Image (spheres, grey):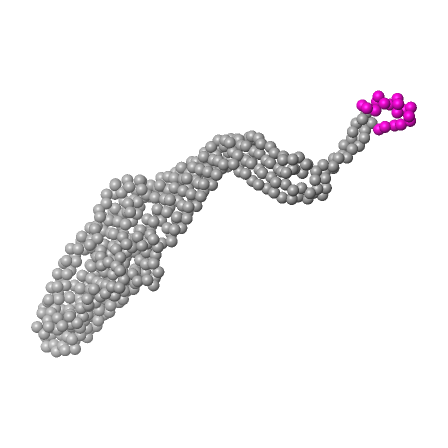
Amino acid sequence: MKRFLIFLIILGMSWRSPSAFSQEKAAVPALTLEECIQLALRNRPEIEMASLDVFNAEQQIQEANSYYYPRLNFTTGYTRFRGPTEFKTDVDISGIKKPLEPLLSQAGLDIPSVIPQQVEVGKTNWYFLQLDLNQPIYTFGRIQEGIEQARLGRSITLHQKEKKGREIIFEVKKGYYQFLLAREVHQLMKEAEARINVVARMVKIGYETSLPGKEEKGTTRLDYLKVKSFHSDVKARQSESSKNLKLAELGLKIAIGVTTDEGLNVVETRLESMPMTQLNSGQVKEKVLEKNIDLKSLDLGVQLFDSRRRAARKEYLPKIGLQGQYVGPEDRLGMNHFWYLGVGITMPLFDGFLTKAKIGQAEVQFQKTKGQKLMLEKALSIQIDHLHTTLVELRERIEILQTGIREAQERTQLAADGYASGITEYDELLLAQKTELEMKAAYLQGLYLYQVAISEMEFISGDV
């Protein structure tokens, strides 16, 4: 009876309120998982950078469209030449000289048949205004292919932005569940330390007041040291759980995108209260083929390289365009308001096999991207099977641990009652408490892993 009363007194002195942790953060608003996700999507800089990529892709579409319009360039300037251009020529007057030869001979004159002449053309100082015009008329689909490639590039950047958002959501979920696990394990260790502290005090009292009879062993110092050793081990694990809780809080802050010196509080949600969703692997695989971002991006990549392949082949074809120029107020030769306008055709004849090389590169990239898409489909299918197997095993493990925890709690209660009444020894109570502690920790770990696996399955399938 004396041992029972001491047991109750020490238990009341050692018990700690489960709400102690929540009271420390009462001043900070508690966040749900959905609120954490929305906060991360607003705070994380990756979303803004992905939006800049989308804006850049939209500008590339405008750039591709611009090739439909004319190119009009204006040039003005001053040029000083060394001097006018000199042209030397010989004027043949033999046709005129021949009829006059009789007269010239009587007069004693001799006129050469060729008279040299020198002509200066052009200005030394030239001021000019110049307009150049180039307007494509028909390019055999080159411009259309460029626009198509730019649009596909924009679609790819949109998918990458969506993927980045899903990655952030997945990261926040993992951080959130990790925080819940760390908080519950920390609370579990606090409670376990409090209960083991009761036993340690009881053993200490028994050791200090033990007066065993001749046939009794009594409580020895070895018994006391065994209990102290186990108590120290639990206190060390409690210290580790406190560290893990701080690290989990830090990780969740980073995932949400808040500064590490800001306060963070999460609603008092227990892992075992969260739904354990069951997913059909066949249905998930169908969703993967339809919604997976990486598959969508690779499909667009196949279309992009197919367009590049077509565009490369068009380099063998000619280009038809309008060309014009205006020079004023006069050109260097003195011609006022010189201008011309005409239609030209550019036909490639030989480019050193450059076009052939471009076609080969585009073909290789096209085939490679198709192969990557098939490989990714197979890899995702295997990953879904792996996750499904993991979820089935975790569900079975959690159910087994639930039963084991109930049995361990009953064992602990019987051992505590037996120890308080003097029927059992302390080591049976310690063993029962240790078994219960290990099972509860494994149970919480299983719940955490299950929620993370579900989140990964949702991330892969695009069902966020």
Q: Is residue 377 visible?
A: yes
Quarter holding residue 10: bottom left
Quarter holding residue 109: top right
Q: What secondary structure is the magenta-colored segment mainly? A: helix
Residue drawn at 34 percent across, 49 percent down = 165
Q: Is residue 183 magenta?
A: no
Q: Is residue 114 above or below residue 235?
A: above
Q: Nearer the viewer, residue 280 or 227?
A: 280
Q: Which residues are magenta?
A: 95-112
Residue 251 percent across, percent down from the top left = 32, 58
Q: Is residue 108 magenta?
A: yes
Residue 444 percent across, percent down from the top left = 22, 57
Split into 4 quadrants, where in the image is the N terminus? Answer: bottom left
Residue drawn at 22 percent across, 69 percent down = 231
Q: Nearer the viewer, residue 235 or 177?
A: 177
Residue 277 lies left or right of residue 125; in this view the side is left
Residue drawn at 35 percent across, 41 percent down = 296
Residue 106 percent across, percent down from the top left = 91, 24
